[in-house]
Image (cartoon, helix red, strand yellow):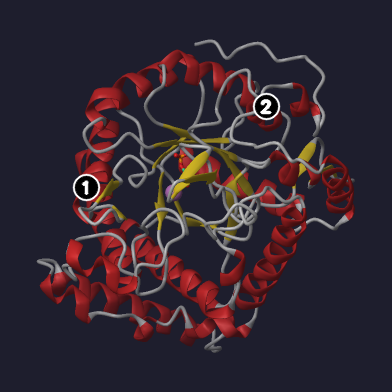
């Protein structure tokens, strides 16, 4: 048990600039970048340090199996979709999923959206072929445009400002919904869809669970004698991959009443699987912030390297600080996860274990549409729960790409979506997401795995 020595090298929000950086293409217009960066630094923060501290405290409970983290949202938010229905639907599905989890698991659920800043994407190739021409790849709206032409794909610093402003609009709307009376409609289970579950063998159980949640909500409202107030304050936190470090570091500041530096563009930034290089710029940036952070871990990785990362990111071993989000792929869970859990355990580091069952299970259909199968996703979740059971640790959360809309991007689930049906409403700009129905069904099936864990103990 040895949690390593502190890294004493000087850190500042911009010290990452002295390190090799992945997935951040050169901005050709340096002058414009400089002025945009300065402007971004001058804007007020999107979240506050108390909310960030509060989230870390809640995550500390998840590290002990006393709360569960539900993190989800689009693979990539896009500027053009910054509108009310999109946000309402995502909040609705996250909220309803959290009610299912709370009802069945009897513990608090920490809701974290991939929202209000999830605009930057790591890519496997820097270029894309369009006809005979090669153009730079689309890296998310924070960098460039989706449109397949050379001009659209230029990395434009002004998009940092646009991303910041649209995140502010989104967050403002989230706050007005979750803190005001408007949200009452969304948390009422009579707005839930039930019918799609008819083809699921658990339909009866599911139906009675929704009834029970409805009764519980009514009960709380009745005893407080106010239909709206009792259920009004719903906490939803924000998260995004801190990939474009100009964006995140511009919003990293010190505040009067809490020590240290906070990334106040979001509550919980995460470090992607492709940017967790120990000596790289992203890790340098992440080691200096007080926010709770997510770290994606999937092949290829070395167990010891993950411990070194934890040493850097959390030298004081603060509980709730690091969420390790494993994304192995369904066939790799049994191969890699036991060793990782053992090595982390032996290091003495406290982490929240979360499972991203999406990114290791993507494949292309014959028609070259990226998809994921509901069953593969569920298999990764099941096996991850099982390995944690066997290793005597807890799975404290899940990380899902999902939407509250009726899209057709992942195959399977009770609604029986087949590969042929994917084109019907395939909307994602990056990876395939679970739709509203698939998300509710997944939440329900997750609770079954959780129960299996606790029944065995
Ligand atoms: C993502 O979460 O969108 C992502 C790119 O994941 P990963 O870093 O795990 O590949
Ligand atoms: Co993705």
Q: Residue drawn at (37%, 22%), measured in percent from left and top?
A: 340
**Which quadrant is home to the C terminus?**
top left
Q: Residue drawn at (25%, 30%), measured in percent from left and top?
A: 332
Look at discs 1 and 2 and give the one toward the viewer.
2
Q: Position of residue 144 (x, y in %)?
A: 63, 53
Closer-to-camera residue (229/168): 168
Which corner quadrant of the image does residue 11 belong to? top right
Q: Is mark 1 within 8 Å of ligand 2?
A: no
Q: Are marks 1 and 2 in contact (CB under 8 Å)?
A: no
Q: Position of residue 307 (x, y in %)?
A: 50, 18
First in sequence, mark 1 or 2: give its number.
Answer: 2
Closer-to-camera residue (267/453): 267
Q: CA distance from mark 1 to mark 2?
A: 34 Å
Closer-to-camera residue (4/296): 296
Q: Which mark is residue 281?
A: 2
For mark 2, give the secondary structure: helix
Q: Residue drawn at (46%, 37%), measured in percent from left and top?
A: 124
Closer-to-camera residue (455/315): 315
For mark 1, give the secondary structure: helix
Q: Position of residue 202 (x, y in %)?
A: 14, 67
What residue did someone put label 1 on?
Answer: 376
Taking 168 as reference, is 370 above or below it?
above
Q: Which residue ends up furthest to the front in the rendered image?
A: 132
Q: Which mark is residue 261?
A: none
Q: Is residue 286 left or right of residue 161?
A: left
Mark 2: give few (<14), some (14-19) or many (20+) Cα within 10 Å: many
Q: Is residue 414 left or right of residue 151?
A: left
Q: Position of residue 143 (x, y in %)?
A: 65, 50
Taking 423 as reference, is 45 above or below it?
above
């Amino acid at each position: 048990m040895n949690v390593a020595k502190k890294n004493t090298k000087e850190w500042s929000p911009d010290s990452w600039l002295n390190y090799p950086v992945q997935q951040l293409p050169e901005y050709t217009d340096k002058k414009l970048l400089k002025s945009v960066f300065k402007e971004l630094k001058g804007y007020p923060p999107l979240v506050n340090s108390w909310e960030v501290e509060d989230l870390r405290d809640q995550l500390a409970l998840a590290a002990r199996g006393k709360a569960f983290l539900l993190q989800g949202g689009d693979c990539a938010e896009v500027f053009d979709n910054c509108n009310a229905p999109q946000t309402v639907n995502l909040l609705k599905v996250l909220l309803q999923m959290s009610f299912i989890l709370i009802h069945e698991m009897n513990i608090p659920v920490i809701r974290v959206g991939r929202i209000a800043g999830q605009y930057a994407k790591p890519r496997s190739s820097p270029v894309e072929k369009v006809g005979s021409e090669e153009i730079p790849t689309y890296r998310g709206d924070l960098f460039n445009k989706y449109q397949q032409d050379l001009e659209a794909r230029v990395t434009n610093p002004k998009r940092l400002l646009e991303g910041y402003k649209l995140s502010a609009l989104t967050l403002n709307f989230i706050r007005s919904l979750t803190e005001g009376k408007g949200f009452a409609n969304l948390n009422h289970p009579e707005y839930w869809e039930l019918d799609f579950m008819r083809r699921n063998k658990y339909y009866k159980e599911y139906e009675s669970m929704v009834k029970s949640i409805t009764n519980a909500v009514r009960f709380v409202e009745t005893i407080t004698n106010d239909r709206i107030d009792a259920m009004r304050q719903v906490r939803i936190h924000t998260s995004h991959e801190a990939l474009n470090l100009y964006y995140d570091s511009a919003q990293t500041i010190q505040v009067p009443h809490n020590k240290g530096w906070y990334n106040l563009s979001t509550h919980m930034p995460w470090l992607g699987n492709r940017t967790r290089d120990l000596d790289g710029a992203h890790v340098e940036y992440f080691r200096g912030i007080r926010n709770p952070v997510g770290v994606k871990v999937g092949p290829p990785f070395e167990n010891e390297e993950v411990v070194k990362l934890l040493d850097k990111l959390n030298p004081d071993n603060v509980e709730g600080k690091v969420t390790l989000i494993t994304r192995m792929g369904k066939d790799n869970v049994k191969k890699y996860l036991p060793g990782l859990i053992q090595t982390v355990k032996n290091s003495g580091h406290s982490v929240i274990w979360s499972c991203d069952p999406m990114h290791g299970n993507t494949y292309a259909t014959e028609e070259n549409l990226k998809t994921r199968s509901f069953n593969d996703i569920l298999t990764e979740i099941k096996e991850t729960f099982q390995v944690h059971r066997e290793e005597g640790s807890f799975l404290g959360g899940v990380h899902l790409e999902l939407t509250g809309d009726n899209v057709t991007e992942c195959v399977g689930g009770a609604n029986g979506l087949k590969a042929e049906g994917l084109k019907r409403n395939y909307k994602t700009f990056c990876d395939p997401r679970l739709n509203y129905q698939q998300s509710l069904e997944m939440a329900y099936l997750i609770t079954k795995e959780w129960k299996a864990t606790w029944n065995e103990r």
